[in-house]
Amino acid sequence: MSNLSRRDRLREAISNGLLMAGVPPAKMPGGYFPAFKENQLTGEEIKRLLFGSAITGYVYYPQQFWMEYKKNGEFTWRGSDPKEPNSSDTGKSRIDGDAICWQYQKRFGGIEYCGTVFRYPGGTYDGKDEYFWGTDLGYGTFSLVK
């Protein structure tokens, strides 16, 4: 059994438990994101969505970020705090099954980490949360830059 399938089962169990407990899906910082299989993007969908696109969203709410992806998965990342030493960086991303993996030059010590991407049915372009990803480092929301 792969780690991804264990992660999928755990994510489903947590989301179902929150729903049964009466916690509604909500925008950050409260509630939870509906990380259900029916909202999950496949690896090919992630690649078509992100590679060659620009996105903006939130990590560690309310820290806004911007990313520009080249078709080959290389990216440039910029955060909203110019005083932060790692407020901009470059790196490479790749698709691994139905996950995306990122490796920054400086951020996170250059260690690769992966995440699963979902459509957020309650998200909006203005909220920068039409999509979200969950990783071992946390979660973030994003929308494509128009």
Image (tube, grey):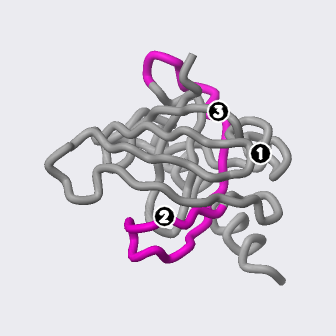
Res. 113 image quadrant:
bottom right
Quadrant showing the N terminus:
bottom right
Left or right, residue 6 beside residue 26: right
- Gap between marks 2 and 1 measured at Cα: 18 Å
Residue beneath disc 2? 104
- The image shows residue 62 at horizontal and vertical percentages of 28, 38
Q: Is residue 123 above or below residue 117?
A: above
Three-letter code for the amino acid on which mark 3 is drawn: Ser
Assign a secondary structure to mark 3.
loop
Q: Which residues are magenta?
A: 101-127
Indicate whether residue 117 is drawn in magenta: yes
Mark seen at residue 124: none
Does label 3 or label 2 sit earlier along the sequence?
3
Three-letter code for the amino acid on which mark 2 is drawn: Tyr
Residue beneath disc 1? 47
- Asked if the residue at tag 2 contacts the one at tag 3, i.e. Cβ–Cβ closer than 8 Å, the answer is no
Three-letter code for the amino acid on which mark 1 is drawn: Lys
Assign a secondary structure to mark 2.
strand
Q: Is residue 35 above or below residue 65?
A: below
- Gap between marks 3 and 1 measured at Cα: 10 Å
Assign a secondary structure to mark 1.
helix
Residue beneath disc 3? 53
- The image shows residue 109 at horizontal and vertical percentages of 39, 76
Q: Quick one: 124 or 34, which is closer to the camera?
A: 124
- The image shows residue 52 at horizontal and vertical percentages of 69, 36
- Asked if the residue at tag 1 contacts the one at tag 3, i.e. Cβ–Cβ closer than 8 Å, the answer is no
